[in-house]
Amino acid sequence: MEQLPKNATIDDAAGAASLAVAIAAPGTGGPAARFMETILAVPTEARREKWIHEVAEVVMELQKRIENFSLERLSRNDLFVTVTLEAAQIACRNHHEEKLKALKHAVLHAALPDGPGEQLQFMFLRFIDEMTPVHLAILAILDNPPHWMEQHGVVNPKWTAGSVSALIQYCVPPLRGQPEVSEQLVRDLQARGLLDPGQFLRTPTSEAGMMQSRTTAIGRVFLGYISEA
């Protein structure tokens, strides 16, 4: 493969990216199976095309960041190709922009020399697939609540005391009045080793306690992996 030209367009990169995106073709079956294939064909193709465009943007970004970048070397990067293919499968099963953005950043990190180890990357892809956008939001909030509020234009109420559960419900309006749902989401994150263990959600604490970081070391690596490099 040749290097992308310096004036390459997103369409040029998309053509290259499409070579690295493999989507399993729908199988054949009886009338019910063919009916499902018919109603899913258009949205699946649309998602596939959207994902190719996202990977094309990653390729363009890599061209800016990597000296003497070439598509040939990128195509020989087994980790990048595997992550891209895995991410493509996940992307075609999802419509949430938050998860698609996380997958895009994962592909970018897979091509950069300072990305996480191979096993961590595969584990992180599984986490993106399994978790909801609200899981990702809670993890980011509990990593650095004041910073998250500032980034998202949420007014810091400057509580004198409260609980982590109240903090989550304040920052994620759909969870207000649903502490049990918040607890389940936090347990999911703890089970994956992304948040500190323990039952801290409803424990009364000071403002400093509410605002302290509760992500683990792996949780912070994961957040970096799904964020812009």
Image (cartoon, rainbow, N blue to C red):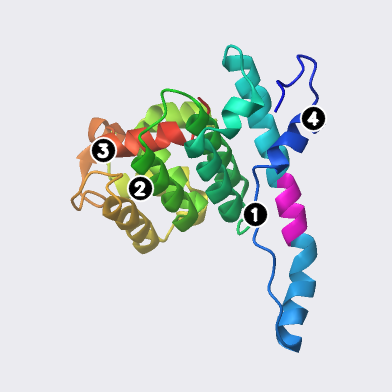
**Badge 2 local density, few (<14 within 10 Å), some, or many (20+)?**
some
Q: How far apart are the two marked residues, 3 and 1, measured between alpha carbons?
A: 28 Å
Q: Do the residues labelled 3 and 1 touch (CB within 8 Å)?
A: no
Q: What element carries label 1?
A: loop
Q: Are marks 2 and 1 in contact (CB under 8 Å)?
A: no
The residue drawn where x is 61% and y is 59% is 93
Report the side of 89 relative to 176 (left or right): right
Query: Which label belongs to residue 166?
Result: 2
Q: How far apart are the two marked residues, 2 and 1, measured between alpha carbons?
A: 29 Å
Q: How far apart are the two marked residues, 3 and 2, measured between alpha carbons?
A: 21 Å
Q: Name the residue under label 3.
A: 216
Q: Which of marks 3 and 2 is in front?
A: 3
The residue drawn where x is 68% and y is 74% is 27
The x and y percentages for residue 202 are 25, 52
The x and y percentages for residue 127 are 42, 51
| Amino acid at circle 1 | His
Q: Mark 4 points at which residue?
A: 12
